[in-house]
Amino acid sequence: MRIFAWSLVIVAVALQGCYSFSTENRLAHLHTIAVPIFNDHSGAGIAQSRSELTKALIDRLERESALRLIPSLSLADALLEGTLVAYSDLPAQLAATTGRAATNRITLIVQVELEERSTHELLFSERFVGSAEYAIGNMVAQQEARRRAQHQIAESIADRIISGW
């Protein structure tokens, strides 16, 4: 039994320091980024969704990253393209008394690709989801729920870019 215990101690000491975690941002060499207005393939027909989502992301990147946003696709170090691929506005909660929807949930799904322009390397391609609920019959609350879902997505995309993973 003593030999087994000492064997475990020796293995533990030998393996100490073998694991490392790097927080190095693999996108640190990128200094500029172009973000054209997102496409909309959702079929929802909400014209302002594209520009609102793009603006929310640009605002977040300008506030929280060292990347400089530039309008020129050809001069940018990176190109971020996004497409709204799904938009739903469905019942989320039913009223106990009537059995009808009391709240709806707006859900947006966006496909995003980040490309390094000089090498044409695809740095990542991911889907991001945002959702928010609102009270039925309240158009202002519906618009606000859509904005909250857009901001969730913008936050997730910006975090992904800033973290460099």
Image (spheres, rainbow, N blue to C red):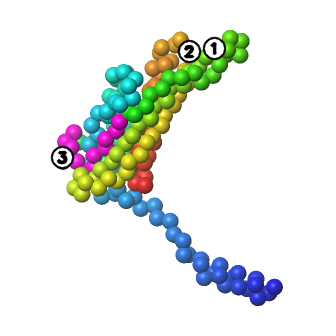
Q: Residue 100: give its label.
A: 1
Give the mark nearer the N terminus: 1 vs 3: 3
Magenta stretch contains residue 77: yes
Residue under label 3, please give it: 74
Q: Which residues are magenta?
A: 71-83
Residue 123, position in %: x, y?
34, 53
**Which structural element holds mark 2?**
loop
Q: Residue at x 68, y 11 (%)?
A: 98
**Which structural element holds mark 1?**
loop
Residue under label 2, please give it: 136
Quarter containing the N terminus: bottom right
Eyeballing the image, is 148 above or below 36?
above
The answer to whether marks 1 and 2 mark residues whose Cβ atoms lie closer than 8 Å is yes
Q: Residue at x 54, y 71 (%)?
A: 19
Q: Quadrant of residue 157?
A: top left
Residue 46, position in %: x, y?
37, 21
Eyeballing the image, is 97 above or below 129?
above
Q: Identity of the amino acid at label 1?
A: Arg
Quarter containing the C terminus: bottom left
The answer to whether marks 1 and 3 mark residues whose Cβ atoms lie closer than 8 Å is no
Residue 62, position in %: x, y?
34, 41
Left or right of 154? Residue 38 is left
